[in-house]
Amino acid sequence: MLSSDIDAPDEGTPDDGTPDEGTPDEGTPATEALDTDVLVVGGSTVGLFTALFLARMGVRTLVAERHPAPLAHPRAMGIGPRTVELLHTAGIADAVDAECMDMRGGDLQMFATPTLAEADLEALSAQAPPRTDAFRDVTPRHLRGTCPQGRLDKVITAAARGAGARIEFGTEMVAFAQDDARVTAQLTGPDGPVEVRARYLVAADGARSGVRESLGIGTSGPGVIGDPLISVLFHADLGEFTGGRPFTVCDITTPEAAGGLLPVDGDREWIYAFRYPRDAGLTSDDFTPQRCAERIRAAVGREDLPLEVVSILPWQVRGALADRFRDGRVFLAGDAAHVIPPVGAFGMNTGAADAHNLAWKLAYVLGGQAGEALLDSYEQERRPVAATALQQSMLRLEDPSLHWQTGEQGRRHRASAGAVNAPVIHLGYRYDSGAVIGPVAALPSTEDVEPDLDGSPGSRLPHHWLAPGGRTRSTLDLVDYRFTLLAGPDGAAWPKAAAEVASRLGVPVDAHLVEAAVESVPSWAAAVGIEDGGALLVRPDGFVGWRTRAPAADPEAELAEVLTALLDRARAPRGSGRPA
C-alpha cells in the first residue's frame, strides 16, 4: 500500500483576478510582454506535470510559481501506480526511483506504539503480513518505495525544462482577464512586472486557489476537517530504535506527544505530524523549533535525542470539489479543482492524472487537430474521478482499516461500508464523455482492479507483457502520448487504414498488430474483448477511446468517422498541427 499524502499549501494566490488598468507611476519600467500557448499558475507537482506533458507535445508553456524553489518540506510521499506509469511514459521513472526510500526490505506498514522506543520493530516486522502488491500484474513499472514530493518536483522540473517548458520560480500572477481569443495575465517576479498573453491558462494554484475564487467557482464538500496540524521535518539518527527496518507510518499514542512519525529517507530524515486543538487559543506560531524538538523527543522516548528541526509546515485537512473545472479558457487542476484528505494517497495522484488528461487535449486543439468541444471532456472525465476519490478518502478518514485491511475480511468490511478498494480508485476508473466512443461506464468490480481493465472504451488500456522481451516491454509502451491503434493478429487491414486516416486528417496514428505472443494471457484479443480481426483505438493518455470487436467492412471509413467524432473535428479550425 501507499503512504498517505499531505494537503499541500496553495501554490500562489492572485489578488482579485482583475487586471490593473491604471497608468504606471512615473519612472516605473515598461511592462515586458510575453506570448505563450499555455500559462500554468502554480509550480508544485501538478503544475510541473502539466508543463512536462505539454512541452513533450511541442506546446509553448510558461509556469509561474510564487515560491523561489520547489518546496523541500514533503507534503506528499505516496506515488500511486498510475502516476508511476506517467513517469515511465515521460522517461523519468528511473530518476524518481533513485529519490525514493527503499522499502523493499520489510513488510511493516502501519503500527501504533506509545513511543518509538517502546516498539519492538523486530517482532512487529516478523508478525507483519507479507506486503502484497495489488498492482503487480496490472502495471508494468514499480518504484522501490515512497518519494518526498520536493524530490519528485525537482526531477519533474528538470525534465520539463529539458522538454522546452519555461518555469519561473519566485513569480506570482497578480491579475488576469480572458476574452474569446486569449488570457492576459499580469505577473510579477525577480525582474519586475511582465504581461503574458496565453491561449489558455491552467490553474494549479492549490487548495485556496485565487484563480478559482476570482472566477466565482464554488466548491462542495466538507471543507475544513478536524483540528489544524503541524508537520515537522527533522533530521535525527533513529537507527537504535528502528534497526534500519522500513515502515510507512508509526502512530505515536502517548498523550503528551500523540502524532504520526513518517520516514522520509529511512535513515536520518523524518516527518513528525501532530494536531493541536483549535479552541485552545494556540496558533501555528506557538510551535517554535524548540517546542517541536521537545515534542519529538517525547514521541521517540528519549529526552536527550540529538536532532535538528529543518522546517515547520502548518497544514489543514480539507475536503472540497470545485463546481466546475473549466471557465472559458481557464482550467482548474490538482488542489485547485479538488482537495482530498490524506488517507489513501489519492490527492496528488489524482492531480497528476488531471495534468495528463488535459495536456494532450490542449495540444490537439492548439494544433488545429481538434475542436473546442474536446476540452469539455476534461471536466466530464476528471470531475467524477475526483468526486469518487474525495468520497472514498472521507470513508477512510472515519475508518482507516477500510484502506489497510486485506483478504476476505477486508473485502467484506469494504462492501458493508460502500468502500472501493484502493487499486480500483487508482487505476480502475473509467471515463464517460464525448472523447470516448461507446463508453462502458459500469465497473465489473469495486474490489479487484484486473476485471476493470478489460479493454472497454473509457478504461485504461490493460497492461500485458509483450513477448519476446523478458518482461521489458508492455502493451502500454506502445502508446507514446499519441493515438495508437492496436489490432488483433488477423487485423492486417487496420494499420493501412490508420496510415490513410492519419494522412487525411493530419492526426498522427500509430498502429500495431498485437500477435498471440503476449505473456500471461492465451489470447490478447480475447483479453481486451475483441475478435482476432478487431481493434482498439487508444487515446494519447492511454485510455481506450473506441473498440470494434469484429473486422470492419471499410476500416478506413470507420476509423475516420471515429476520430472525427472523438476530436470534434467538425468544428476544428485548420491549423499547423505543430503541437500534436
Image: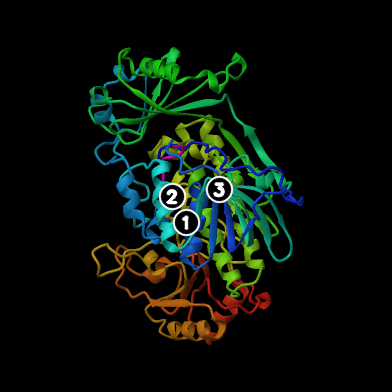
What crowding class fits label 2: few (fewer than 14 Cα within 10 Å), some (14-19), or many (20 or more)?
some
- Residue wearing tag 1: 452
Q: Residue at x 59, y 14 (%)?
A: 280
Front: mark 3 or 2: 3
Q: Are marks 2 and 1 in contact (CB under 8 Å)?
A: yes
What crowding class fits label 3: few (fewer than 14 Cα within 10 Å), some (14-19), or many (20 or more)?
many
Spatial CA span between label 1 and label 3: 34 Å
Quadrant of residue 249 within the rendered picture? top left
Q: Are marks 1 and 3 in contact (CB under 8 Å)?
A: no
Task: Give the x, y percent position of residue 404.
Answer: 41, 35
Position above or below: 359 against 334: below
Type of amino acid at the residue the image marks with label 1? Asp
Looking at the image, the residue that sits furthest to the front is 27
Position above or below: 150 against 314: below
Task: Give the x, y percent position of residue 67.
Answer: 52, 42
- Residue wearing tag 2: 448
Q: Are marks 3 and 2 in contact (CB under 8 Å)?
A: no
Spatial CA span between label 3 and label 2: 36 Å
Q: Which mark is residue 205?
A: none
- Residue wearing tag 3: 42
Task: Give the x, y percent position of residue 84.
Answer: 39, 52
Quadrant of residue 290 within the rendered picture? top left
Circle 1 SS class: helix
Whether the magenta-drawn stretch holds residue 151 is answered as no
- Give the magenta-colored segment's residue range: 74-83
Type of amino acid at the residue the image marks with label 3? Gly
